[in-house]
Image (tube, rainbow, N blue to C red):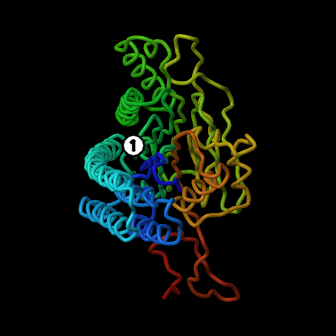
Amino acid sequence: MGKRGGAHRERGGARSVLRADGPPRWVAHWLPALLIIGGTVFDVATPMNYTASPFFSAAPLVAAPLCSLRATLTTGVAAVVATFLLLFARGLTDHTESLTELATVVTVAGLAIVINRLVRRSGRRLESVRTIAEAAQRAVLPTPPARISGLAVAARYEAAQVDARIGGDLYAVQATPFGVRLIVGDVRGKGLEAVEAVAIVIGAFREAAEQEPDLEALAGRLERALRREGGRREGLDQFEGFTTAVLAEIPNGAEGPGVLRVLNRGHPAPLLLLADGSVRGAEPSAHALPLGMADLGVWPDRADELEFPEGATLLLFTDGVTEARDGGGVFYDPLERLRGRTFPGPDELLDGVVADVALHTGGASTDDMALLALRRPGRRRVWTGWEPGAERVRAVPSGPGTSSVPAA
């Protein structure tokens, strides 16, 4: 606290109530009142050469970004009235000093009202931007259906910044005449140019996935789409724009032969989580450059074929997962962190990965994360009746709608 006549300045640095990550509601309701009450107690309990005006000046400034206009105005009036009554009760002989204190509180209260209006207006603009960004994300990266060709599907997009809603990470999955095809990728760069590139890659994938007979041809279509886009751009992106990506195909979905084909273009390798808790990394047999970098060299694409057994889950992610670091600089290793763990479904798996990354980094992630998981349903033994001297059972797909009912 300052002595009478001393200069004092308070800054209202709290965040607006319009922000989703703002302070608890009780702060907005009680902190300004507590400041006024605390200032009154301080003024009564201290000698006359001490002033409580910093308390009364701070109260409307705290209310300005946290409360409504009416609450801010009420707080300002209460602070001015409390200052006046305490000065009157003290009966100070130095009227100039008393008027200066009162004028200071009145001025700060007026500024608090102006700040409140500016914060509320900025908050409305921010909400409008968020709404537009969310609509853009839903348009570019729509949430996939929970089931595609019998496969359980889940997707997540986790922005590194709280206010962000979309960036350069991408995913898509769809049923095609050749099976379920999917892509997870990461576009170089940030901002609107990255979002534009995401839209181009996703659009090219959705069209080519329906037409191209194999993943190698599909990758070629994406390469050509990015090269056309690079030719239309000027500056650095014309030469250095690229996208790391993983393409995968599950022939005939859950009813297929249990085969998974993966083509990797410079992206973190997917993981295959088996029903017993073991984890396999789907490392590429031959490394290749990201999409959009054909000018630096051409290598023939090669899709690797893996077993995709019943009850297994395919997990794909961007480098926001593998490059997440803890306080000691140790990178997050999803293969080691997920080994020995089982999850009821792909949604729970993605929730677990996101929570585990946040735990590893202490909530200080610096890059966006896109995750996509597909599970092939397992089979379980169901009672079907008796045969002489033996139990007769049959295997049925596990999942919603199945039941263990004895056969008639």
Residue farthest toward the front in the current orientation of the protein: 93
Relative to residue 367, is residue 389 drawn left or right? right
Q: In the image, what residue occupies the spot 66% across and 84% down?
A: 391
Residue 58 or 251: which is nearer the viewer?
A: 58
Residue 301 in the image, given as x and y percentages of width and height: 57, 24
Residue 238 or 406: which is nearer the viewer?
A: 238
Identity, as a three-letter code, of the amino acid under mark 1: Thr
Relative to residue 141, is residue 110 drawn left or right? left
Residue 236 in the image, given as x and y percentages of width and height: 46, 13
Q: Is residue 243 above or below residue 132?
A: above
Q: Which residue is mark 1?
A: 176
Mark 1 neighbour class, 10 Å CA radius: few under 14, some 14 to 19, many 20 or more: some
Residue 170 in the image, given as x and y percentages of width and height: 45, 38
> SS of the residue at dot 1?
strand
Residue 68 or 393: which is nearer the viewer?
A: 68
Q: Is residue 132 above or below residue 392?
A: above
Relative to residue 163, is residue 127 drawn left or right? left
Relative to residue 204, is residue 317 drawn left or right? right
Residue 335 in the image, given as x and y percentages of width and height: 70, 48
Q: Residue 85's image quarter?
A: bottom left
Q: In the image, what residue occupies the spot 61% across and 64% down?
A: 343
Q: Report the number of numbered marks.
A: 1
